[in-house]
Amino acid sequence: YSPATGEEIGELAETSLSETGFIYERSNTAFKTWSQLAVSERLVYFKRLRHLMAEKMDEIAEIISKDTGKVKTEAIVADIMPTLDGIIHIEKHAVKSLARKKAATPLLLIGKKSYIEYMPRGVVLIISPWNYPLQLAMVPILSAAAAGNTVIAKPSEITPMVGKCMEQLFIEAGFPEDVIQFAHGGKEVGAALVEHNPDYIFFTGSVRTGKIIGEAVAKKLIPCTLELGGKDPMIVFKDANLERAVNGALWGAFTNSGQVCMSVERLYVERPIYDQFLVLLKEKARELRQGAAPSDDVGSMTFPAQVGIVASHIKDAVQNGAVLETGTDPDEWKTGRTLFLPPAILSNVNHSMAIMKEETFGPVLPIMPFDDEEEAIALANDSKYGLNASVWTQDDVKANRVAGRLVTGAVVINDVLVSVANHSLPFGGAKQSGIGRYHGENSMRMFCHEKAIVKDSGMRKTEIQWYPYHGKY
Ligand code: NAD
């Protein structure tokens, strides 16, 4: 794997800051017609896009792999397929979800009818990250557009070829001009777009940037959704299916080289099985094949800056007494100048270490024993993050009890990460992992003003609560 060459990126010109104002003007103009189409008329373009993406799946997967360093299987299974599934979900549910909904009318309003209507907000700005560069841009873009909004998308500058590929897909699918526009570039372009007063902002990225955007929108009272980072715990009780839990931990920690917002970043194992678990975990970790070939399991990191963060977390942990059970000393990485980091397992860790507190976003799995259910819950909740978690046990009652007490946006029982793959479930974080939810019922309605309508037939002369009172009550 090598990042895109200068020549390749040369064709991918960045959007100039002065152009951002014109993008908004065009978006506002396009809104006037796009918002007036029936939902079913908008969905015609979605079907075309889905067919086009299915046809070009291989080509798109190559671009994602080239831009991110992830193996092709992961590009298809974890980025393209969820996007297609997201489009299918929208095609299936948009008409009903966005239709006028009848509401109950109380006795006080007798003779009237009540409804809820979903009105598009206007111009939606969608800012997305590099780790799943397709689905994390496409799903919110399409949810907002299905609801009748026009969209300005600002994909990550770290994966510019995927950004251009998405723009091209919308053109080829024949979407009307300016309904979905792309602005390419880094944080300066993103910040300039925020300054232009979009009607809604949907942001996916780091807590650091989330706070900057949160501050900017608070000043202008622009509504927004923030989908941010995580430090997800996995809790394995002694009655869990041991081999399944080991396999799940490896995949949950190392898929996409750990660059997943819901990666397993903290592994807690009940003490009676801890030693056995660690032996098996190390054995299986060593069997993983690393490289860029389709037969490989673990790909590379996407860009060098992230390697520095991973190295600093491992070094800090080892200096404070952690044991590197698999993987290599970060000092050895520099000599090879490689983005392929060997999956690392760290034992003897504690919650004072950065590796248990901060998002690492790399192929590192710190493991820690616990003594009972209370301690496991306390450890899992001892984090500023709260995106996802997993609980592993054969005891259904215990699984539900523990899941109910974890302060996270989702919990997966006897599996990892997969809650995000179900578009019928809400997705989002607790604590600093974010504000708001998408997917599920909310995915299109979030991009709408929910409008209350009360209708009277207008036939009666007056109402009981109108003047004159004449001491009625
Ligand atoms: P990032 O915050 O650095 O960048 C995300 C996007 O914001 C990029 O497009 C970037 O150009 C833009 N940006 C940066 N500064 C900006 C500013 N001041 N104003 C406007 N836009 C700005 O995040 P990243 O490194 O691309 O992504 C990794 C992070 O995203 C991790 O923390 C990960 O956990 C998180 N993430 C969260 C989810 C989720 O759904 N919760 C999904 C994937 C990734």
Image (cartoon, rainbow, N blue to C red):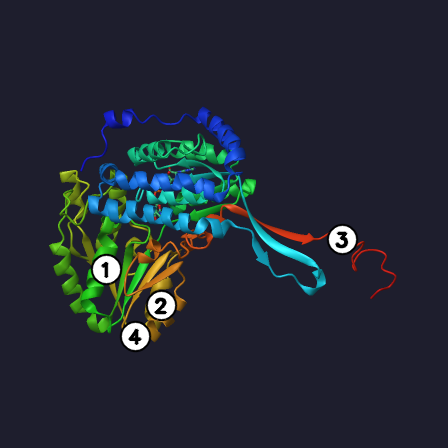
The amino acid at mark 3 is Met
* Crowd rating for badge 4 (residues with CA inside 10 Å; few <14, some 14–19, many 20+): few
Q: Is 150 positioned to the left or the right of 74 in the image?
A: right
**Label 3, label 2: how far apart the Cα atoms are:** 61 Å
Task: Pick whichever of labels 2 and 1 is earlier in the sequence.
Answer: 1
Instruction: Answer whether labels 4 and 1 touch (C-beta < 8 Å).
Output: no
Is residue 311 visible to the viewer in this orientation of the structure? no
Instruction: State which mark lies toward you, 3 or 1.
Output: 3
Q: In the rendering, which numbered label is found on residue 459?
A: 3
Q: Quadrant of residue 418?
A: bottom left
What residue sits right under mark 1 in the picture?
249
On the question of residue 254 being in view, the answer is yes
The numbered mark, 4 or 2, whose residue comes first in the sequence reads: 2
The circle on residue 395 is 4
**Mark pair 3, 4: CA separation:** 63 Å
Q: Nearer the viewer, residue 231 or 134?
A: 134
Residue 117 picture location, percent across and down: 57, 50
Tag 2 secondary structure: helix
Q: Is residue 66 above or below residue 325?
A: above
- In the depicted view, which residue is nearer to us: 63 or 103? 103
Q: CA distance from mark 4 to mark 1?
A: 19 Å
* Mark with earlier residue (3, 4): 4
Measured Cα–Cα span from mark 2 to mark 1:
18 Å
Q: Which mark is residue 377?
A: 2
Asked which secondary structure carries label 1, the reply is: helix
Instruction: Assign a secondary structure to mark 3.
Output: loop
The percent coordinates of residue 281 (x first, y second) are 17, 61
Earlier along the polypeptide chain: callout 3 or callout 2?
Answer: 2
**Element assignment for label 4:** loop
